[in-house]
Image (cartoon, helix red, strand yellow):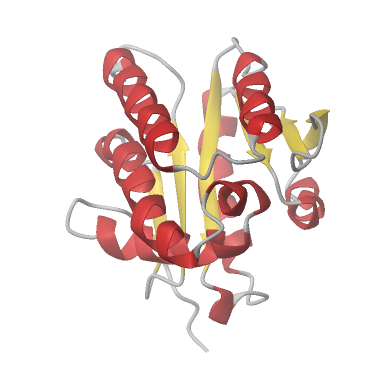
Amino acid sequence: MTLPKVQAVGPEDSEQAISALTLAFATDPCIRRFYPDPRDHLAHFPEMMRIQIAQPIKHHSAHYVEGFSAAAIWFPPAGPNTDAEAEKAARKRMDALIMDTAHKDGNNDVFAAVEKVAELHPKERHWYLFAIGVDPRHQNEGLGSMLMKHALPKADADGALAYLESSSPRNVPFYERHGFEVVEVVQIGDSPRITLMAREPR
């Protein structure tokens, strides 16, 4: 059996990669608090990904598994080849999109938790895993691990920390298997538990 390959997402591939992530995040505790109506999730989550994937595409740090059954979006460390202003503008656009479209009733604790997570984002040089997901139809096939094994050697070669946040507790053991350790857990009121994790370079 020939294993599918991991490839870099190009502009022509972005919508298919985003579709895989949209399916994968359909049960994400934090995202679904923002968009409990499936129609809203399908309408707004892809736009969040379109905003964020643009810079990683330029740096070849957004990846997909052949067949678009899984995808990941990484931000490389800030440096002369990255565009800090473009990334900052993208974050502002995404924040504005969420504020304009997210379900707000009863979600004050969720917004507070997300704000706290942003405050705790590491200041040191790091690779940031913004999103990783597998089409539910293809889960438990090792595709998430394929994406991790493709990306983490780049962080190691760079001598840089790898960092992520997860609002799904069931995903924490997966990240631990790939060398991540829990840094902190953020939960405010009835918000989802958001686990902050980091991996030292090998």
- Picture coordinates of residue 113, whole percent (x, y): 69, 28
Viewport quadrant of the C terminus: top right
Which residue reaches farthest left? 12
Instruction: In the rendered view, tell whether residue 10 sits above or below residue 90.
Output: below
In which quarter of the view is residue 25 placed?
Answer: bottom right
Q: Position of residue 85 (x, y in %)?
A: 29, 13
For the point 52% across and 89% down, the residue is 1
- The residue closer to the viewer here, 48 or 97, is 97
Image mark count: 0
Residue 102: tell me if it is visible.
Answer: yes
| Quarter of the image where one finds residue 81 | top left
Residue 201 seen: no
In the image, 55 versus 166, the foreground residue is 166
Q: Answer above or below: position of 98 versus 168.
A: above
- Left-right relation of 139 to 5: right
**Quarter-of-image position of residue 139:** bottom right
Residue 24: where, in percent of width, then height?
54, 64
Q: Nearer the viewer, residue 121 or 35?
A: 35
Of 127 and 43, which appears nearest the observer?
43
* 74 shown above or below 14: above
Q: Residue at x 23, y 52 (%)?
A: 10
Using residue 163 as the reference point, say whether residue 75 is left or right of it.
Answer: left
**Residue 80 x %, y %:** 31, 12
Residue in view at x 42 percent, y 58 percent:
40
